[in-house]
């Protein structure tokens, strides 16, 4: 099997999708088992325009928000408009303001590297942070990959608590994206840990998208009564929701095709039986696919009637217009201008994106401190 430095696909809820549950379930109310209260507006509801108004919208000017990063990975917005950002191999957590002020606020304990793609990966700020001060991380530990919760009081991290463990790890294919859906539940992407058969094993956590309460329990309505929401994934790293609450996912393939999938609960997305489009009964085909040299996608975000997908090996930002459940013709921007693109997120209240690089990772071959966070104007 060919192993590529898997990207983490980081995506963001950029819509007022509060009344729809991602992937078509009924919107849940606050759950006594620990679910956050459903949000009434996505974090970028005030900024992006509708698809009908932006058929010719495109990413425009790029400016540097912050430099001197070493493999920034997860990014999640705080209520004050600053971002919480993780560094994969240092296990450090920072805040970054929109003016570029960067501050380390702690480290995630018990995190380990794998010499490949493991380490401190996704981050997600509680939608009720003002009252609970909770933030969530996905990271590699001694026994495998974990989802953990910590308290962030605005200046420092504390109170580490493991919510989910037993997600197998490997040097590559650890997944790692964390994101709250418009239903108030926490979603996590788990790679196949270079053991492809796990993706088809519904009793395993690997090769899956997981959906849970803020205490790490299976979310109500999950299709199998477990944490598993969808299966048959190789190395999923991008999650985002459109304004109708549909869940989109970006996934690294092996040697043939990377995928953009529309996720529905309980569906089988094919790996390892299928890579890209196939006619095998019971498999759900991707909405779009790319040759691996053009993509190796990590983060994905919704804005302006389109999905924006960051590409690692492809070293470009893809814009894919969406119309309902259909994904239109992708168009590439900034090809090889900024190197390996890891995470893309919509900036709350603005018609802009934040885009980060991981040129200091194994396949980027750049020295520590060479990564950046950019701001992309949408025009």
Image: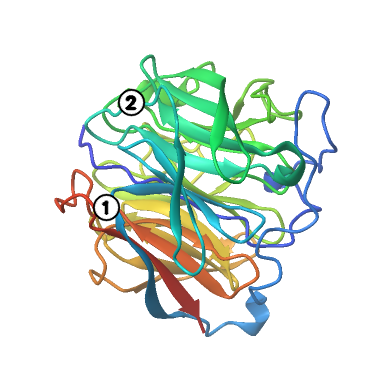
Tell me which corner region of the image, top left, top right, bottom left or bottom right, holds residue 81.
Answer: bottom right
**Element carrying mark 2:** loop
Closer to the camera in the image, 360 or 7: 360
Residue 265 percent coordinates (x, y)? 64, 36
Residue 262 visible, this angle = yes
Closer to the camera in the image, 320 or 189: 189
The Cα–Cα distance between marks 2 and 1, rounded to whole angstroms, is 28 Å
Q: With respect to residue 272, does 86 lie above or below?
A: below
Residue 84 percent coordinates (x, y)? 51, 49
Residue 250 visible, this angle = no
Residue furthest toward the front? 155
Depth-wise, is mark 2 or mark 1 nearer the camera?
2
Left or right placement of residue 321 versus residue 211 in this view: left
Left or right placement of residue 182 versus residue 350 in this view: right
Q: Mark 2 and mark 1 in contact? Answer it, CB < 8 Å.
A: no
Query: Which residue carries the number 1 mark?
Result: 292
Describe the colour scheme in one phrase: rainbow
Tell me the quarter of the image containing the N terminus.
top left
Tell me which corner region of the image, top left, top right, bottom left or bottom right, holds residue 221.
Answer: top right
Query: Which residue carries the number 2 mark?
Result: 112
């Amino acid at each position: 099997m060919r192993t590529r430095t898997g990207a983490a696909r980081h995506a963001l809820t950029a819509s007022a999708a509060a009344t729809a549950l991602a992937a078509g379930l009924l919107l849940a109310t606050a759950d006594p088992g620990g679910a956050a209260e459903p949000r009434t507006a996505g974090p970028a509801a005030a900024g992006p325009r509708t698809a009908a108004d932006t058929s010719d919208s495109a990413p425009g000017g790029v400016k540097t928000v912050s430099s001197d990063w070493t493999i920034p990975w997860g990014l999640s917005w705080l209520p004050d408009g600053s971002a919480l950002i993780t560094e994969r191999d240092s296990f450090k957590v920072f805040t970054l303001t929109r003016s570029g002020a960067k501050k380390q606020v702690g480290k995630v304990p018990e995190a380990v590297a794998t010499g490949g793609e493991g380490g401190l990966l996704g981050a997600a700020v509680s939608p009720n942070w003002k009252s609970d001060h909770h933030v969530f991380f996905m990271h590699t530990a001694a026994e495998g990959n974990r989802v953990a919760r910590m308290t962030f009081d605005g200046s420092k991290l504390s109170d580490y608590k493991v919510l989910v463990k037993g997600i197998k790890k490997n040097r590559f294919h650890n997944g790692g994206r964390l994101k709250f859906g418009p239903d108030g539940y926490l979603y996590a992407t788990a790679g196949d840990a270079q053991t492809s058969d796990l993706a088809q094993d519904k009793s395993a956590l690997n090769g899956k998208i997981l959906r849970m309460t803020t205490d790490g329990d299976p979310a109500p309505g999950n299709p199998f009564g477990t944490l598993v929401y969808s299966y048959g994934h190789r190395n999923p790293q991008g999650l985002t929701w459109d304004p109708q609450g549909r869940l989109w996912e970006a996934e690294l393939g092996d040697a043939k095709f990377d995928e953009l999938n529309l996720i529905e609960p309980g569906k089988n997305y094919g790996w390892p039986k299928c890579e890209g489009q196939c006619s095998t009964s019971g498999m759900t085909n991707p909405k779009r696919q790319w040759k691996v040299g053009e993509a190796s996608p990590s983060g994905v975000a919704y804005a302006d009637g389109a999905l924006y997908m960051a590409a690692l090996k492809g070293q470009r930002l893809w814009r894919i217009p969406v119309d309902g459940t259909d994904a239109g013709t992708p168009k590439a921007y900034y090809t090889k201008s900024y190197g390996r693109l890891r995470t893309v997120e919509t900036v709350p209240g603005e018609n802009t994106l934040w885009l980060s690089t991981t040129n200091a990772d194994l396949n980027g071959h750049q020295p520590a401190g060479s990564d950046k966070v950019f701001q992309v104007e949408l025009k």
